[in-house]
Image (cartoon, rainbow, N blue to C red):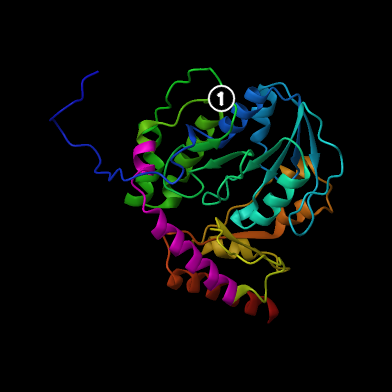
Amino acid sequence: MNKEIGGYFSLELRGEGEYHNNAIRLNTARSALQYILRAKKYKKIYLPYYICECVLQSILAEHLQYEYYPINEKFEPIFDNQVLKDECFLYVNYFGVNDHNVIKVAGKYSNVIIDNSQAFYSQPLMGIDTFYSARKFFGVSDGAYLYTDTLLPDTFEHDVSYNRMEHLLKRIDISANEAYSLFLQNECDLNNSGIKKMSQLTHAILKSINYDACRKQRLENYQYLCNKLGKLNMINLPPIGNQVPMVYPFITNESGLREALIKNKIYIATYWKDVLKHALSDSFEVDCMQRLLAIPLDQRYTTADMDYICENIFEYLRLEKN
């Protein structure tokens, strides 16, 4: 088709380049996982209890057996089985601050798959199948990147996402709260999309992001939260090094803090309620699901915003003590 010239304007996007320029572009992280499972022809997968249940869609679609394993308080796998030739081992780089565990896992187990959905900036290890989710870090309605050495011959169609952008646009024009139902609808639509190539709209947006500026702001906000909340945090976080976090994971014994923050329009996600279906009630995974606060720190916010979050936390803790 000839290039269209003239007529009305589209969005003004810079198109300077992507962060994961050499990866396979797909519509979702679960599609990336399904791509790996299909390409490598695995028969069974080991996956952590502490993971979004949506990954089961990819596993069941490829008719794999699956078995869960627990993790400890350092987010390390508790797993001593041998991974056989037709099996694989999935590990999640939790919150984008567990690169050290990724290296350990890659050196210890066979047929490792790394879920870097929460670690967009972490580089893939040579020879290790790795996938990423753009939606966890940037304002797009779809988008995933995949690194693998085994390519499928399938020709996948491009996703189309212009009709799933309303929640992003409405948040700017009105509010996140007013657009939340549209966000949930987009999540539902993606659940049923199957493997597709990344939409051209998402690709254009991801080529227009200042990744260095986003990295710098996230790290600045993370360090601020570490300095303010570190002594209260029951998670012993590793040194950040070159990692770029998705959120600041924070655990306290005080119940009700999540609800208090949300009441003040500080929206705290819960990861992942489905854990209750699989893990033991007294497990670390269930404890994380119930008590871990994923404090937002992304490039939309400054240290002044981080200070506002901290003051809300301190105020709640003071009220609880009195």
The residue sitting at the left extreme is: 6
Query: Toward which corner of the image does residue 262 lie, by quadrant?
Result: bottom right
Vertical placement of residue 253 versus 187, above or below = below
Q: Is residue 189 above or below residue 246?
A: above
In magenta stretch: residue 221: yes
Say which residue appears at 42% left-offset and 58% top-offset. 214
| Residue 102 in the image, given as x and y percentages of width and height | 68, 50
Indicate the secondary structure of the residue bearing disc 1. Answer: loop
Give the amino acid type for the residue marked by disc 1 in the picture: Leu
Quadrant location, the N terminus? top left
Please give left or right for residue 88 compared with residue 220 in the image. right
Of the pair 220 and 146, the residue shown nearer to us: 146
- Number of dots carrying numbers: 1
Q: Residue at x 56, y 21 (%)?
A: 152
Tell which residue pokes out farthest to the bottom in this image.
322
x then y, percent, for residue 229? 61, 74
Which contiguous range is marked in magenta?
203-227
Which residue reaches farthest front? 126
* Residue linked to disc 1: 151
Quarter that holds the C terminus: bottom right
Q: Is residue 95 magenta?
A: no
Q: Position of residue 189 (x, y in %)?
A: 50, 30
